[in-house]
């Protein structure tokens, strides 16, 4: 299965019955899959007139109590930021997929990871966060897409699956097991179903609070959820870090490159490991504490000019040097390039 | 004692925040009465706009969602697709619908979304303090067209009903006014019909209601009603522009 199709199939498997989207490369297999498959399971696909409209359809559908998905790629996700802010402000659950392409501007259609800041630091206006899950292979894309729906419902907050054009277009075997919620899901006793069905008490979906003290209370309540998210939802992988002199930090596509580079390094006798954030928000700050004492340096590899790098600096907090290697514009770094970076790093001080 | 008139149970009773002489209150009443008379208040979901009617969710006695500026038809689409048995309506002003939300309204109409749109046109941005709208009349002074709207450069009024009536999938498009009692009765019938068409699954219905803004027009409430009749109606002819069932 193609990555994009695997994500779409996982969404349907997780009970998603509504998709609103707008065509953009390199994620078109997602809306195409949904347009083909949703009607077969009693669902609805709507091709919106723009990403702006699509995300607002998501808002309406989420507010009506549905499991709902939209997908896009970088420029389209930029257009959705207004709506994502409203969805977070109104505390609605939804799942967003960003199959990143290179920017800025129209950029290019090749893979990139340059939307990290936008995805993990808010993206739209106001105080809010989006939970961000970054799959590195297709089975993980399936599992994280399903998890995204559960986390969205649990926290009443948008959750983004952040991948790139390479993962979207990649083909790997995946297993779709019968879906089981990852956690207890709260009842949607806030959804606008009409007062006749809900027993008379009006339900309002809204993010407008004109009195500053009320708005501050509202935002503080949202941030109490984020505290819980940061405590309980952190996910990461440590690979060959036990004896690593250099720990490469990479997510998604670049973590696959890093894995190949580590194999090559190990054959050359260089002790290199991988710290792979799976949740980008919440960022696995604690994972660094587990490896920082044993390692001599970190090497951050991204398909950007250095965005996750900032979070790694916060996590390492000056305890070890941090090197950065980034390619951008749609260029995927090769394992050989990464090996050279490791060699330069270790050559500098000598093992 | 016999009750001959009462406030519609379709309204919550929360005091309206609208300026004296503004006809939003009348239009709220017509919408509320229509929902009650059609016996759909309990399954109605309102979508409130950004603009003067931003607090519509406080006033209509039904479930509601507050939309971003101009996005109400997209939000309504999401709600209606998930819950087709709900009666979903947007309540939007002319800045919201005819300017920033033009894409959303045109495409909701194009898809024939089975929703009802109450479009309140008062030819100005009220909430933000009287700026020029796409529906501002040529020559009408506003805070951002202080010399009066000029046809060249600032353009002439956008006639939403005429434009949307060209769209094949629309079921009902009408323009009404509430500046006089007879007109108010016509407006009520149009709004009720628009909701009835949604109940009957006939598709997209929109009623444009010419409305006053005494505060930002700088007129007394009575003069503002007269201004609707003398200036707005010539620019915005009243009538039914589309009725998929025929008749008017």
Image (cartoon, coloured by chain):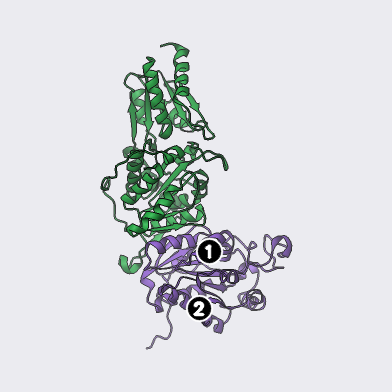
Chain colours: A green, B purple
Q: Nearer the viewer, residue B164 or A225?
A: B164
Q: How many marks?
A: 2
Do the residues marked 1 and 2 share a common chain? Answer: yes
Q: Residue at x 39, y 46 (%)?
A: A5
Going from N to C along the chain, the mark reached first, 1 or 2, is 1
Task: Look at the numbered discs 1 and 2 and tell me whether their residues touch, using CB distance below 8 Å.
Answer: no
Q: Is residue B115 visible?
A: yes
Q: Nearer the viewer, residue A297 or B5?
A: A297
**Crowding near pointer 1: few (<14 within 10 Å), some, many (20+)?**
many
Quadrant containing the N terminus of chain B is bottom left
Residue A168 occupies quadrant = top left
Q: Residue at x 45, y 42 (%)?
A: A99
Residue indicated by mark 2: B190
Mark carried by residue A95 = none
* Dot 1: chain letter: B
Vertical relation: A67 (above or below) A264: below
Vertical relation: B100 (above or below) A118: below
Looking at the image, the residue that sits furthest to the bottom is B1
Disc 1 vs disc 2: which is toward the camera? Answer: 1
Mark carried by residue B105 = 1
| Disc 1 secondary structure class | helix
Q: Residue at x 39, y 25 (%)?
A: A260
Vertical relation: A251 (above or below) B93: above
């Amino acid at each position: 299965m193609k990555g994009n199709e695997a994500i779409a199939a996982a969404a349907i498997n997780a009970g998603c019955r509504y998709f609103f989207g707008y065509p953009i490369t390199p994620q078109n297999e997602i809306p195409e899959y949904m347009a083909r498959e949703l009607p077969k399971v009693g669902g609805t696909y709507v091709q919106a007139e723009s990403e702006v409209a699509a995300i607002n359809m998501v808002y309406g559908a989420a507010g009506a109590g549905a499991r709902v998905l939209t997908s896009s790629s970088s420029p389209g996700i930029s257009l959705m930021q207004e709506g994502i802010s409203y969805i977070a402000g109104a505390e609605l659950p939804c799942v967003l997929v960003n199959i990143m392409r290179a920017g800025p501007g129209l950029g290019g259609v090749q893979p990139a990871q340059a939307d990290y800041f936008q995805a993990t630091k808010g993206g739209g206006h106001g105080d809010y966060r989006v939970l961000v899950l970054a799959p590195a292979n297709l089975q993980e894309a399936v599992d994280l897409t399903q998890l995204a729906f559960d986390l969205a419902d649990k926290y009443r907050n948008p959750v983004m699956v952040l991948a790139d054009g390479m993962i979207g277009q990649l083909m790997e075997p995946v297993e779709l097991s019968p879906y089981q919620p990852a956690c207890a899901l709260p009842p949607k006793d806030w959804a606008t179903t009409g007062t006749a069905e809900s027993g008379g008490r009006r339900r309002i979906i809204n993010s407008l609070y004109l009195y500053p003290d009320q708005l501050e209370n509202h935002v503080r309540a949202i941030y109490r959820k984020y505290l819980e998210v940061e405590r309980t939802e952190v996910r990461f992988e440590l690979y060959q870090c036990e004896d690593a002199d250099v720990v490469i930090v990479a997510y998604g596509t670049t973590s696959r490159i890093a894995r190949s580079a580590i194999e090559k390094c190990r054959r050359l006798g260089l002790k290199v490991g991988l710290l792979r954030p799976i949740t980008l928000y919440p960022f696995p700050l604690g994972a660094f504490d587990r490896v920082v004492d044993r390692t001599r340096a970190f090497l951050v590899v991204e398909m950007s000019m250095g965005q996750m790098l900032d979070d790694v600096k916060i996590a390492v907090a000056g305890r070890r040097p941090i090197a950065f290697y980034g390619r951008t514009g749609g260029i995927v770094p090769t394992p050989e390039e990464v090996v050279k970076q490791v060699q330069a790093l270790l050559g500098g001080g000598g093992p | 004692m016999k009750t001959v008139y009462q406030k519609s149970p379709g309204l919550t009773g929360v005091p309206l925040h609208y300026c004296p002489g503004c006809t939003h209150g009348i239009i709220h009443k017509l919408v509320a009465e229509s929902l009650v008379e059609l016996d759909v208040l309990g399954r109605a979901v309102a979508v409130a706009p950004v603009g003067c009617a931003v607090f519509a969710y406080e006033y209509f006695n039904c479930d509601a969602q507050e939309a971003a500026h101009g996005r109400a038809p997209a939000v309504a689409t999401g709600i209606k697709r998930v819950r087709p048995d709900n009666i979903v309506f947007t309540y939007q002003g002319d800045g919201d619908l005819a300017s920033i939300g033009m894409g959303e309204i045109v495409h909701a109409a194009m898809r024939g979304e089975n929703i009802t749109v109450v479009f309140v046109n008062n030819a100005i941005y009220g909430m933000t303090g009287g700026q020029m709208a796409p529906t501002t009349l040529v020559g009408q002074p506003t805070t951002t067209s202080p010399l009066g709207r000029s046809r060249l450069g600032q353009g002439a009024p956008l006639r939403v009903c005429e434009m949307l009536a060209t769209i094949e999938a629309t079921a009902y498009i009408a323009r009404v006014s509430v500046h006089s009692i007879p007109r108010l009765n016509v407006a009520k019938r149009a709004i009720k019909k628009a909701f009835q068409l949604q109940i009957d699954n006939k598709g997209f219905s929109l009623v444009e209601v010419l409305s006053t803004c005494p505060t930002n027009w700088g007129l007394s409430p009575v003069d503002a009603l007269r201004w609707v009749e003398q200036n707005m109606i010539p620019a915005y002819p009243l009538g039914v522009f589309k009725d998929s069932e025929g008749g008017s």
